[in-house]
Image: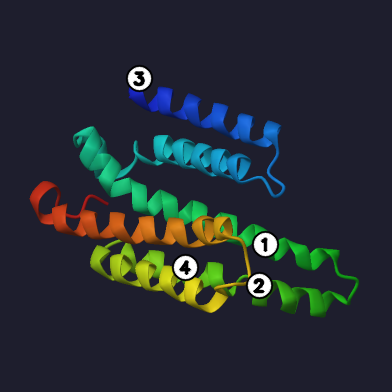
């Protein structure tokens, strides 16, 4: 049975996505932020009803699902940047190779998510390292908002995985 709060979160997410797209997402940080927050709310409301977490208190469920959902949305967001290879006028194999190269960061984050799903301390450590590595490697090349949009979700995911790891033994034993 779906709880009323889950439906409210989903409606808020849908409204955020629609608002974000209506104000525009091209070089518009508030629009991008609204879309990402909306997708987070929608994903959380759907995923929180699965697995053995549905009988947990809402805050514990939120702590469990938030880093996982945020990581999935981060992967999808970063993967959008790989789509620019289709604007190039090269051969099929060149475009496929360029697409694979552009998807390396997303694939790396996906591998870390798979490992972190059961071993949260690894995700807490690695996502924070990825956030630092991005800032160090790209420093000075972009406006500050880009660092917040790319590294911010990585840091937040890492922090949430660490919180989840600390609370894991106290509130739930392997909820999947």
Mark 1–mark 2 distance (CA, rounded to whole Å)? 7 Å
Check residue 109 in the rendering and tell me which mark sits there, or answer none.
4
Q: Earlier in the sequence, mark 4 or mark 3?
A: 3
Q: Earlier in the sequence, mark 1 or mark 4?
A: 1
Q: Residue at x 27, y 52 (%)?
A: 176
Front residue of 144/34: it is: 144
User: Which marked residue is nearer to the observer: mark 3 or mark 1?
Assistant: 1
Q: Earlier in the sequence, mark 3 or mark 1?
A: 3
Check residue 102 in the rendering and tell me which mark sits there, or answer none.
2
Query: Neighbour class for label 3 at 10 Å: few (<14), some, many (≥20)?
Result: few
Q: The N terminus is located in which quarter?
A: top left
The answer, for residue 2, to whether it is visible in the render is: no
Mark 3–mark 1 distance (CA, rounded to whole Å)? 36 Å
Cβ–Cβ under 8 Å for marks 2 and 4: no
- Judging by the rendered image, the residue that carries numbered circle 1 is 81
User: Which marked residue is nearer to the observer: mark 4 or mark 3?
Assistant: 4
- Judging by the rendered image, the residue that carries numbered circle 3 is 4
Question: Seen in the image, is 67 located left or right of residue 32?
Answer: left
Residue 138 percent across, percent down from the top left: 56, 74
Residue 3 percent across, percent down from the top left: 33, 23
Cβ–Cβ under 8 Å for marks 1 and 2: yes
């Amino acid at each position: 049975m779906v709880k009323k709060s889950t439906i409210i979160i989903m409606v808020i997410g849908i409204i955020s996505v629609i608002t974000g797209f209506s104000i525009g997402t091209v070089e518009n940080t508030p629009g991008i932020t609204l879309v990402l927050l909306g997708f987070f709310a929608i994903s959380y409301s759907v995923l929180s009803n699965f697995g053995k977490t549905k009988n947990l208190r809402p805050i514990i469920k939120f702590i469990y699902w938030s880093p996982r959902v945020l990581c999935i949305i981060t992967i999808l967001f970063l993967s959008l940047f790989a789509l620019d290879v289709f604007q190039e006028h090269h051969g099929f194999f060149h475009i496929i190779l360029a697409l694979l190269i552009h998807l390396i960061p997303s694939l790396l984050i996906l591998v870390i998510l798979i490992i972190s799903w059961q071993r949260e301390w690894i995700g807490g450590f690695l996502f924070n390292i990825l956030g630092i590595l991005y800032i160090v490697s790209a420093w000075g090349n972009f406006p500050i908002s880009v660092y917040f949009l790319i590294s911010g979700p990585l840091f937040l995911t890492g922090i949430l995985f660490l919180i989840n790891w600390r609370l894991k033994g106290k509130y739930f034993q392997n909820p999947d």
